[in-house]
Image (cartoon, helix red, strand yellow):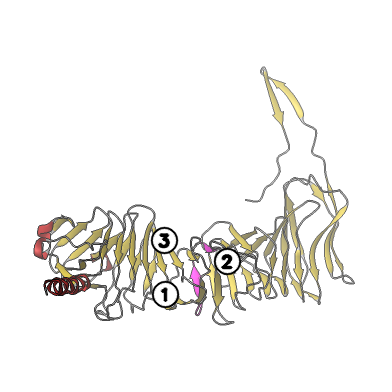
Amino acid sequence: MKTHLILASSLASLVCALSVEAADLTAIWQPAEAGSFSWEIPASWSGSVVPNNTTTPSVNNYYANITISNGAQVISTSRALTLSRMNLAVSGSASLRLVLGGDLTILDSGFTSTTKTAISNITSSAANLEIDLNGHRFLANNYLGNSTIQTASFYTISSSVAGGVFALQQASYNGANAVQVMNNVTVRLSYNGAQDLRGWRFADGSTLQMAPASTTQSNLTYLPTTGVANLLIGDASQSSKSTSTLVGDARVRGDVKVLSYAGAVGGAASELKFYATTGKLYVGGDFIDEGTDGFNYGAGTLILDGAAGRTQKLSIGRTGLSTHVQIGDTVSGAPSAEVMLERNLTTTGNLRITANGTLDLQSFTASAGLVRLDDGSELILALDATSGHLISLGNLTVDDFTLHLDGDGGNWTSGDDLLLFEYAGSLSGSLNLVSVDADFNLTYDGLYNDAANGRVYLKNIALIPEPGVAWCMGGGALLLTTLCRRRKA
């Protein structure tokens, strides 16, 4: 009988322990006055217990509830923390700035849509509720319930030190009120489904990273109308690709990079897709795709528009593209766009160089279904024995254009012809070479259209030796004089 009593007592203790383990303990922030506070002060929390989940074993699971209605408060953590869920709320004339001193992980597991972590700001400014990542990570297992809390909610994500990551599963539409993402912040989204960022604002120097965690997942992404500063597709540390599909037109003011992933084979990498054939992706900086397989973005249009104010690098090694590529925007007042190929480009879509556009082929080729050079367009080639050129798989349209020749011509044989274009269909347009400038002195005879073979050349390019180097003595100094030559800025 004694043994049975001990067993019964042990079972009761086990049930009790399991009940405690599953409990969600609420810790309510106590200070009501303005000032700077440490998260680690027990007296600042109800029950005088600092909320931080016990991880081995997980006995105490905390819900941290911070609600500020008066004054300006700054709350700082000093270590990595884990919570079951959290509420950050400000109202009236209050403001709150949460500064991380380590990663903050919020599990949000097992909670309903009305009880998961929420951020609520019903003041007059997004600046009144700020999470300063301070170079650390805010890791939310669920999405922050913008759609389940007051629609006036908006807040600021900053990082006073570079490297801050704000990671959550899903972003939801926040109406006209914006979530402000500041410099040094990467917002990382991993949910398999819609990502609606139309109410978000991304400052220059911030990054949006789309990283669903398996090959069966895909983001259906609505970007803000103001665009994002930089865009990453995928995660190099993941063991599988990520896929992100852009809905409607999208704008990236800085760089786009499509990443490979750990263990990728056959040139595979993460994937960027156009939802519709009419979709446009405007990119102001570099567009770099690490994939070299046969993946196709779809028949949308990639527009490299020069918005970043610098030479843009274009590197796409995918071999199955039907995407249109456009160099320069055509809207009134659009900036000039100079795009430099980093590898051969192949697409069955169209390639267009606009009046605002310059394409620098270096020694690569660009092949497209149709090729068009508008009036005022510019083309840059490296003059050597393996110079690149443009290839049209169909018709070629060339109007007034300018040609720049780079390099030193060291591998060029004077008197040879430089191939500029190949075309399989018909040739149209004025085919007028406005001017040629180079990094060296040369002569040429003009353009020649070999219609029978579908090729356009710049004929009989001859290099002119520079005047001999002159050694001049003067005032006891030895001076070296050379011929000055124009270089394209």
Residue 444 percent coordinates (x, y):
84, 54
Other residues around mark 3 within 10 Å, as few (<14) / some (14–19) / many (≥20): many
Q: Which residue is mark 3?
A: 206
- Do the residues under discs 1 and 3 have CB atoms within 8 angstroms? no
Q: Which residue is mark 2?
A: 269
Label total for image: 3
Q: Quadrant of residue 296?
A: bottom right
Instruction: Give the secondary structure at mark 3.
Output: loop
- The residue depicted at 30 percent of the width and 77 percent of the height is 146
Is 255 above or below relative to 220?
A: above
Residue 468 percent coordinates (x, y):
80, 33
The answer to if 254 sits in the magenta stretch is yes
> Please, what is the three-letter code of the amino acid marked with disc 1?
Tyr
Other residues around mark 2 within 10 Å, as few (<14) / some (14–19) / many (≥20): many
Can you tell which of label 1 and label 3 is closer to the viewer? 1
Q: Which residue is mark 1?
A: 191
Q: Earlier in the sequence, mark 1 or mark 2?
A: 1
Can you tell which of label 3 and label 2 is closer to the viewer? 2
Task: Decide if residue 109 is on the left or right side of residue 353.
Answer: left
Q: Earlier in the sequence, mark 3 or mark 2?
A: 3
User: If the image is split into quadrants, where does the N terminus sit?
Assistant: bottom left
Mark 3 → mark 2, Cα distance in angstroms:
23 Å
